[in-house]
Amino acid sequence: MKKLIKVLTLSVLLTGLMSFAQEKTSYVPAKSINQEYNALYIINEADDQKLKAIIRNINNALEDQRLKDKLNVELLAFGGGVEMFLKKNPYQELLVKLKKRGVVMVQCENTLREKKIDKSELFDFVNYTPSGNGEIILRQYEGWAIIKP
Amino acid sequence: MKKLIKVLTLSVLLTGLMSFAQEKTSYVPAKSINQEYNALYIINEADDQKLKAIIRNINNALEDQRLKDKLNVELLAFGGGVEMFLKKNPYQELLVKLKKRGVVMVQCENTLREKKIDKSELFDFVNYTPSGNGEIILRQYEGWAIIKP
Amino acid sequence: MKKLIKVLTLSVLLTGLMSFAQEKTSYVPAKSINQEYNALYIINEADDQKLKAIIRNINNALEDQRLKDKLNVELLAFGGGVEMFLKKNPYQELLVKLKKRGVVMVQCENTLREKKIDKSELFDFVNYTPSGNGEIILRQYEGWAIIKP
């Protein structure tokens, strides 16, 4: 009888261990719940390919069925990323489309000072934050997701 | 007597200030507590060096004594990062080793559509998510650590 | 009377919808609250421009009025980022200034082992962590903001 109990106990333990090992390698998909999601996208490079990639990425996130109509996006530029918001550059059409989907554009004011750029050189729909780095830190503390593609 | 009190008060204040200054510049090591940790590793570039670096990074995290046997890792590929999961590329051995350690591989389906890649071209052990960007946002909201080396 | 009610209901609904649309595209600035903030800055590339940019970024964050006297910064180097802390390289002056502002420097010990670098080659004020990747994961779980410029 004692032996039987031992064997049974061992089987239960082994099954537990195996299911744990199993669990560790199986994919548990990320799921959305019934809440709003906020994401801060960051661009700090003056690279045409990266600028277009970040816009494509934002659109993909907005179209993800798990986030549909639940996702607020802020697009933050600092450093070389300011190129995205300059009137002289060819991104207006792409940005206006983003804006229509509710994306908010924000430019770091430190960058403007360092690069001697006047606000009048940026699209009118751009908003401003004292420092891009401060914005990133504060948004993380507010619970936002941060994405730097 | 009054002078003595003044001196004493000043000393106490100074000691307080100094210990504050001390505190601010001394390193308080990160410590693990008795819980499970989840980390999402992101690869979105088709760069052989970066692909190998991310695998090395994951192994380092899994071997960190502070996280030993407590860390679950998901490795997410999107954009150029899909190269890591293609059968024709030479990463199978490295990935199988990761998989044995419990790492879960996940590929963005948007990327497959954009690049016209069929799932049959990827290793069988790869899992799929509708969009890599949605996955990143949702995992952050689920409390995961996000690492993009 | 019924028609009036219908019209009124419709107006209320429309106003609601419009204010929602409005809300989604208007910028709500990040605000600091009365608490301490912790930020982990990561450098893992041996790129002189990036090394200087990260120092500039940290200074900008420390000077952001929203974070003034509330922000603790840890600067973590791993991989190629170790160059920043080597005595033979020209970053001492910049780092000492950061240190005076309370920034804590931390080096990944895995990197030293992989690159066969001895601790005596690094500045004396550098602290050590077993693995940079473990540090990143643990800090995120401790609620820190993570910035990789």
Image (tube, coloured by chain):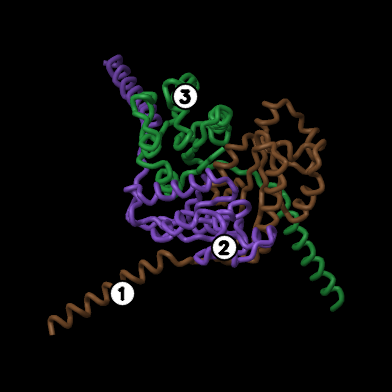
Chain colours: A brown, B purple, C green
Q: Position of residue B114 (x, y in %)?
A: 70, 59
Mark 1–mark 3 contact, CB under 8 Å?
no
- Disc 3 marks a residue whose amino acid type is Leu
Any part of residue A37 in sight: no
Report the front residue among C111 and C34: C111
Badge 1 marks a residue whose secondary structure is helix
Q: Which residue is mark 2?
A: B122
Badge 3 marks a residue whose secondary structure is helix
Residue at the (46%, 28%) spot, across then down: C83
Q: Which residue is mark 1?
A: A15
- Residue C91 falls left or right of residue C60: left
- Residue C122 falls left or right of residue B148: left
Badge 2 marks a residue whose secondary structure is loop
Any part of residue C26 in sight: yes
Label 3 crowd (10 A; few <14 / some 14-19 / many >=20):
some
Q: Which residue is mark 3?
A: C95
Mark 1 chain: A
Report the front residue among B144 and C132: C132
Q: Is residue A109 above or below residue B66?
A: above
